[in-house]
């Protein structure tokens, strides 16, 4: 996988055979803590949404994310290794919890580089997932996304300053809420984003 600096990436995967990846409520919190401990420091998390059988992340790569290599795997960048660790370590924990074996996720994590004009669309698309799936009637009703970090300006795992600067996301909570509500995410754009060639971490599939 070849990452480059100063770029946004859409990272996503779903449960193998559509199975739940968060069988218990506490698993959402556990996965979020893993995002912080494993990814932060190697990239900036801009947005996320954890759904019952899949997840979405939006990442921005900083200077620590590129050009670094793992000694045992000279062509592997640090962030690729961290994404693999995130998925494999979470899978082990859930298999122990549920007394299961085997794959929790579909193959490897999918990673799509976002063109400049698609980054803002992807940001809103990620937060709109629970509403589109009829899991919530309002953004604040779904606690497993980064929406509250922007609406409440709460401390979390996202680098909000990057979203404010590069994605034209308003820092004033009510303005952010209005924009989130009013933006109509064009499904054709999402299909275009997710049908772009994926990195070697996996093949992109439209949701």
Image (spheres, rainbow, N blue to C red):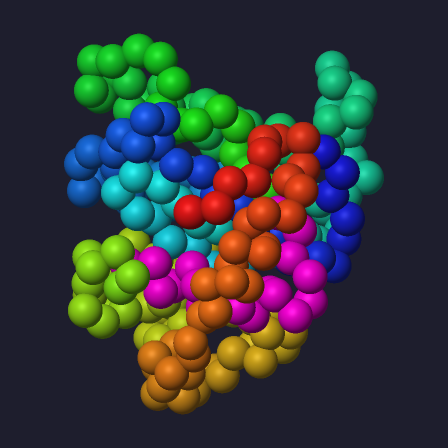
The stretch of residues the image draws in magenta is: 112-130
Residue 132: image quadrant is bottom left
Q: From the viewer's perspective, is residue 15 above or below residue 66?
A: above
Residue 92 x %, y %: 36, 19
Which residue is located at x 53 percent, y 68 percent? Answer: 121
Residue 156: image quadrant is bottom left
On the rendered structure, is 180 left or right of 130? right
Residue 31 x %, y %: 36, 39
On the rendered structure, is 146 left or right of 95? right
Q: From the viewer's perspective, is residue 170 above or below residue 68?
A: below
Q: From the viewer's perspective, is residue 134 above or below residue 102?
A: below
Most prominent secondary structure in the magenta stretch? helix
Q: Which residue occupies the foreground of this view, 16 or 162?
A: 16
Which residue is located at x 72 percent, y 33 percent? Answer: 1
Q: From the viewer's perspective, is residue 175 above or below residue 133?
A: below
Residue 65: image quadrant is top right
Q: How many marks?
A: 0
Residue 145 x %, y %: 34, 58
* Residue 33 appears in the rendering: no
Q: Is residue 114 magenta?
A: yes
On the rendered structure, is 27 left or right of 187? left
The residue furthest front is 188
Q: Which residue occupies the foreground of this view, 164 or 111?
A: 111
Residue 164 x %, y %: 56, 77
Which residue is located at x 52 percent, y 34 percent? Answer: 109
Q: Which residue occupies the foreground of this view, 155 or 91?
A: 91
Which residue is located at x 33 percent, y 75 percent? Answer: 152
* Residue 2 appears in the rendering: yes
Q: Is residue 122 magenta?
A: yes
């Amino acid at each position: 996988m070849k990452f480059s600096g100063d770029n946004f990436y859409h990272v996503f995967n779903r449960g193998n055979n559509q199975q739940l990846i968060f069988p218990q409520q506490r698993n959402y919190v556990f996965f979020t803590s893993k995002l912080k401990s494993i990814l932060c420091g190697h990239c900036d998390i801009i947005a996320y949404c954890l759904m019952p059988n899949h997840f979405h992340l939006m990442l921005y790569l900083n200077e620590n994310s590129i050009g670094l290599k793992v000694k045992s795997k000279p062509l592997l960048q640090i962030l690729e290794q961290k994404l693999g660790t995130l998925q494999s370590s979470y899978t082990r924990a859930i298999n122990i919890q549920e007394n299961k074996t085997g794959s929790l996720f579909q193959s490897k994590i999918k990673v799509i580089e976002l063109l400049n004009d698609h980054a803002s669309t992807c940001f809103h698309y990620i937060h709109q997932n629970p509403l589109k799936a009829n899991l919530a009637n309002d953004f604040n009703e779904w606690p497993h996304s980064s929406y509250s970090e922007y609406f409440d300006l709460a401390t979390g795992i996202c680098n909000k300053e990057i979203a404010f600067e590069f994605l034209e996301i308003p820092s004033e909570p009510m303005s952010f809420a209005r924009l989130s509500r009013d933006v109509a995410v064009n499904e054709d754009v999402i299909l275009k984003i997710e049908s772009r060639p994926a990195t070697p971490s996996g093949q992109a599939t439209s949701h």
